[in-house]
Amino acid sequence: MASNSDMGSADFESLSSTSDVELLKRAWRNEKAAPEILPYEGDLVERAKGQIELVEENIEDYVENGIDPLVVSLYQMDLDRTQFLLRSYLRVRLLKIEKFMFHSLKSEEAESRLSEQEKVFARRCADDLAKHFEESVLLKLPENYQSVLKQSLISEVDDMVPEPHLDTFVVCRSKNVISLNLYEEGERPEILEMERGEPYFIRYKIVKGAIESGKIDLI
């Protein structure tokens, strides 16, 4: 008859070895390195939450059934690692929302990158900040200078709204050999052949589309 230790060892499967956790690690790295808020990985986050709940249940069962403490500690270690990735991913996004809250709400494209909860958070932050500025400073200024978004009412653009710097250089690597034009439309093209797995130092806006499509990862 197999011992509890044998049962636990045979049944053990590292949470961090699953593809969803690897995808979560990629999403976390990309979000940390990108100068802008990337599209929210909603399906991935929900799957990761489900895996975390499942492993928590397994740990409780193993403790109750007297499974080898070493096996339990391995499960717990992987669980802690995955929870760290998920929390860090969400925390990085919240920090960016706080920094670019007005920018994130000014267009449908920017707002579509947020989850429903993040949209609520961004609106609440923007409302609270606008109210604070109005009560502490803006209402004491001439009428033409009471906007939170513009230096004055004659400004044609929201020149007081911080925006991500897409010209920022980032370190990235490609999953496969791909060709990139290092310049924007209208400029003289210069094609770069990115080798698989090699690091490159490139302007973010050049690789932005390839990052969102999963062809390139930020480091």
Image: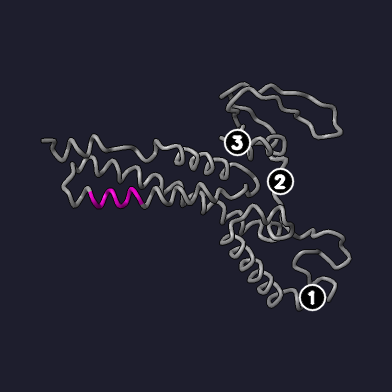
Is mark 3 in CB contact (under 8 Å) with mark 1? no
Q: Crowding near pointer 2: few (<14 within 10 Å), some, many (20+)?
A: few
Which secondary structure, mark 2? Answer: loop
The residue where tag 1 is placed is: 141
The residue where tag 3 is placed is: 214
Q: Residue farthest to the left?
A: 1
Q: Which residue is drawn at 56% across and 24% down?
A: 197
What range of the chain is rendered magenta?
54-61
Residue 58 covered by magenta stretch: yes
Above or below: residue 30 compared with residue 196: below
- Judged left or right of residue 8, residue 103 is right
User: What count of labels does the image hold?
Assistant: 3
Q: Which of 33 and 24 is in front in this view?
A: 24
Examine the residues drawn in magenta and state their main secondary structure.
helix
Identity, as a three-letter code, of the amino acid under mark 1:
Leu
Q: Residue at x 89, y 65 (%)?
A: 154
